[in-house]
Amino acid sequence: MIIEAARLAVANLLAPETRAVFWKVLGITLLVLVGLWLALHGAFNSFALPWLQAFFPDIPSWVGWLAYAFAVVAGFGLAISLSLLLSPVTALIAGLFLDDVAEVVEQRDYSGDAPGRAMPFGPAMVSSLKFLFVVVIGNIFALILLFVPVVNLAAFFMVNGYLLGREFFEFAAMRFRPPDEARLFRAKHGSTVFLGGLLISAFLAIPIVNLLTPFFAAAMMVHLHKLLSRKDPSFSENLRR
């Protein structure tokens, strides 16, 4: 079931509609990072350099050139630092477009089923921030165990497998179920969802490719929710009894 959901998700990543969403998210991400670089670099030139000149008005001219060179190096360093934020910022912005990915999956592979309900902008933003938060916390926890042999790799997959599986499955489930029911459905099929999360963690561990993680995870969990719903069709009825 999990392998089938992953296979279908990869096929959905290649769909023109999904590629369009990805390029849109990547474009917004790059604009945000460039804007942040310009703001921080401008702030450095506007405040740090004048402060240096004000406190040392009689410094030799070569020191001024040294300060200019330092500003250039700082600009490159800032650019490299911001490049490290490419993946998490992409994940944050992608969280606002996950419903678009889910709709592509539902229209292409489940056109005969009732469509899901997209989250309003406010809850979508909260969900996006929550997703970023759990990923950051999960990786900090894994980083703490970085120097513990064997445990470090296991920690990365276990923590991210649980968090990513939970968040993305509940996202997919809440398109068709009330939040409380979605959480209970995820809890009932927790082992399957966790294994799906481990597969997402493996995807996350691949450099460059991991920029597609939110799209792969959303598509995969939409498929997994559909497959589990067909396997357990009486869940909602039993819950209401």
Image: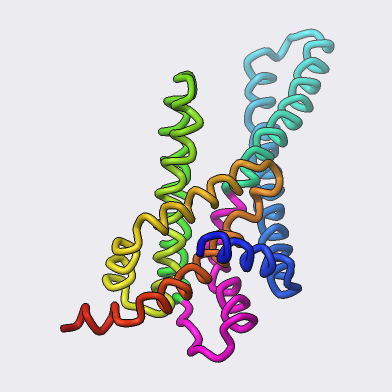
Q: Position of residue 178 (x, y in %)?
A: 31, 77
Task: Name above or below for residue 201 compared with residue 66.
Answer: below
Residue lying at 41% horizontally and 53% vertically, measured from the top left: 194
Coloring scheme used: rainbow
Q: Where is residue 14 in the image (x, y as percent from the top left)?
A: 74, 67
Task: Name above or below for residue 229 compared with residue 214.
Answer: below
From the viewer's perspective, is 93 left or right of 154?
right
Q: Position of residue 72 (x, y in %)?
A: 78, 27
Task: Name above or below for residue 146 compared with residue 32.
Answer: above
56 or 66: which is nearer to us? 66
From the viewer's perspective, is 241 left or right of 49?
left
Q: Quadrant of residue 73?
A: top right
Please, what is the dominant secondary structure of the magenta stretch?
Answer: helix
From the viewer's perspective, is 200 left or right of 76?
left
Q: Where is residue 38 in the image (x, y as percent from the top left)?
A: 70, 44
Q: How many marks?
A: 0
Residue lying at 41% horizontally and 69% vertically, measured from the top left: 123
The quadrant of the rendering that contains the C terminus is bottom left
Task: Name above or below for residue 10 compared with residue 49.
Answer: below
Residue lying at 69% horizontally and 19% vertically, measured from the top left: 53
Q: In which quarter of the image is residue 130?
A: bottom left
* 238 part of magenta stretch: no
Residue segment shown in magenta: 89-118
3 or 50: which is nearer to us? 3
